[in-house]
Image (cartoon, rainbow, N blue to C red):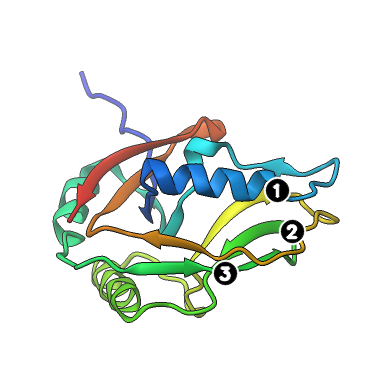
Amino acid sequence: MTMPPLPPLRLFLALWPSPDTATALQARADAWDWSAGARRTRPERLHITLHFIGAVNAPDVLPLQAALDLAWEGCELVLDREEVWPGGIAVLEASRVPQPLAALHAELAERLRARELPVQSRRYRPHVTFARKAQGSRAPPEPAPLRWATGSDYLLMQSLPGGRGYVPLQRFG
């Protein structure tokens, strides 16, 4: 009897906050004046995406994991700009990308391309998404830069179907 193929996994690479950074991110999100229709990101889902990979067939995940394993030193990232992007995405973003993070992002992009996986062509803007459908929401009036010491690890994550959350598949670093 032949088993049906497993459905593809929806994957992304991310930096995940330490508990202290997660608490600071949540406090900053709580300081916003949210519009009635804003869909806030749940606290346990706050992260910085390095690369959205998309659908990957289950048999291709293990070779992908091996290809994405890089050593990097980590860095301090300063998230210092809060705004609502077009389309209603409320973010806390870094106005400057530290060189170690830019190098990690670029090397991961090369490894994804080598596996014929899509890589976004636009400039990398590290950010944390606080909410979607946030048109009319307002960031706190006082700037409050948040410092994120990334550590030397990053994760390969799976998005569960139906928006049920994320599952870590591998921690690198």
Image position of 126 (left or right of 144): left
Q: Residues within 10 Å of mark 2 (few under 14, many from 20)?
A: many
Residue nearer the viewer, 69 or 76 = 76
Tell me what residue is drawn at x 31 percent, y 33 percent: 5
Q: Label 3: state its secondary structure.
A: loop
Q: Earlier in the sequence, mark 2 or mark 1?
A: 1
Give whichever of 138, 134 is nearer the camera: 138
Picture coordinates of residue 111, whole percent (x, y)? 24, 70
Q: Which residue position holds label 1?
A: 31
The quarter in which the N terminus is drawn is top left
Label disc, if present, on residue 56 of the rendered structure? none
Location of residue 116 by image quarter: bottom left
> Callout 1: helix, strand or loop?
loop
> Where's residue 90, x and y in %?
68, 57
Alpha carbon distance from label 2 to label 1: 7 Å
Task: Write down the quadrant of residue 110 in the picture.
Answer: bottom left
Is residue 45 positioned above or below 65 on the image? Answer: above
Name the quadrant of the C terminus. bottom left
Q: Are marks 2 and 1 in contact (CB under 8 Å)?
A: yes
Question: In the image, 43: left or right of 3?
Answer: right
Hey, what amino acid is under mark 1? Answer: Ala
Name the residue beneath numbered marker 3.
80
Q: Residue at x 73, y 50 (%)?
A: 32
Of the numbered discs in the image, which one, if any, rests on residue 139? 2
Task: Specify the quadrant of the image occupied by residue 112.
Answer: bottom left
The amino acid at mark 3 is Asp
Farthest-out residue, top: 1
Q: Residue at x 51, y 72 (%)?
A: 125
The amino acid type of the residue labelled 2 equals Ala
Q: Position of residue 35 (x, y in %)?
A: 84, 46
